[in-house]
Image: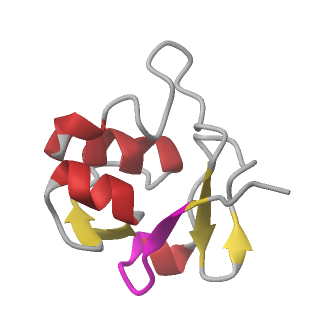
Amino acid sequence: MIRVIIPHHLRTLAGTGAEVAVEVAGPVTQRAVLDALEARYPMLRGTIRDHSTGQRRAYLRFFAGTDDLSLEAPDAPLPAAVASGAEPLRIIGAIAGG
């Protein structure tokens, strides 16, 4: 099971807690985890990734530990600690302003 921590506004939409667990068959990649997350919580489709392009939404970032994975290729393997369930994949809402 892959652990995923989602931001508060998406927790409210999905009706879940801060951390969810999803099953990923095959290589553990950002795309695979997000596909599993959207399959389990269909109301999240289009909130994390754009419907048509599949690209990450601008104000969301992905972290494994202290490593920012936001600009990594969607099909790149996630770190072993995330793939084993030892650490969660964190989806963080970015803060903008001035």
In the image, is residue 5 above or below residue 60?
A: below
**Left or right relative to 58: residue 6:** left
In the image, is residue 25 above or below residue 52?
A: below
Q: Residue at x 59, y 30 (%)?
A: 55
Q: Give the camera-side residue of 72 and 60.
A: 60
Where's residue 69, x and y in %?
A: 68, 59
User: Magenta span has 84?
Assistant: yes
Dividing the picture into quadrants, the one containing residue 68 is: bottom right
User: Magenta span has 47?
Assistant: no
Q: Residue furthest top?
A: 52
In the image, is residue 34 above or below residue 45?
A: below
Q: Residue at x 35, y 79 (%)?
A: 85
Q: Residue at x 24, y 68 (%)?
A: 20
**Left or right relative to 67: residue 56:** left
Q: Residue at x 78, y 55 (%)?
A: 97
Give the extent of the magenta segment.
83-92
Where's residue 43, x and y in %?
A: 21, 36
Where's residue 19, x and y in %?
A: 28, 74
Which of the image's four quarters has the C terminus? bottom right
